[in-house]
Image (cartoon, rainbow, N blue to C red):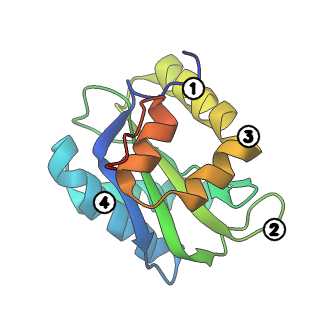
Amino acid sequence: MASDLSDLLVPELVVVGVAAPSKKALFVQLGALVAPTLGVDARVVADALSIREKESSTGFGGGVAIPHARIAGLRRVAVAVARLAQPLDFNAVDDAPVDVVVAMFSPPHAGGEHLKALARVARRLRDRALLAKLRGAASPDAIYALLTDHEVRDAA
């Protein structure tokens, strides 16, 4: 159960084939993705991700980035996942380009909750077998299932 992210991940916030030529463009797209579902302003989200990224890279290594920001108006920690169409330079710790982005958004005063959720996400993304499955997943539903331990039932 520790690897289950179902309390953080919303199915509508999982996308594949995202085309972003830069981190800034990616953050704009993530803002547009999460704004309607989380009830926040897309530009505020994009700006918060950019500000956090300027502090230090959220490139986690292994082709993964975990950009995160605190957003006023949120009631809980939420996660979005984007698999990129083309890897993007993220100044990651291992210098590997990023193709799996797991963005995390927290209320401004969710200090401990934010750190615990970030640690859970990072632990989950250290699993190389899981990363291979995420990269091979054909749909957002399949990615959601992998990260939440839900079964995907293929129509036969």
Badge 2 or badge 4: first in the primary sequence = 4
Disc 2 vs disc 1: which is toward the camera?
2
The amino acid beneath tag 3 is: Arg
Q: Which mark is residue 31?
A: 4
Q: Nearer the viewer, residue 56 or 150?
A: 150
Q: Residue at x 75, y 46 (%)?
A: 128
Q: Nearer the viewer, residue 58 or 80?
A: 80
The residue that mark 3 highlights is: 126
> Can residue 32 be spotted in the picture?
yes
Position of residue 130 relative to residue 121, above or below, is below
Residue sitting at the far bottom: 21
Badge 3 or badge 4: first in the primary sequence = 4
Disc 3 vs disc 4: which is toward the camera?
3
Badge 2 or badge 3: first in the primary sequence = 2
Residue sitting at the far right: 94
Disc 2 vs disc 3: which is toward the camera?
3
Badge 2, how many Cα within 10 Å: few under 14, some, many 20+?
A: some
**Helix, strand or loop status at disc 3:** loop
Q: Which mark is residue 36?
A: none
The residue that mark 2 highlights is: 95
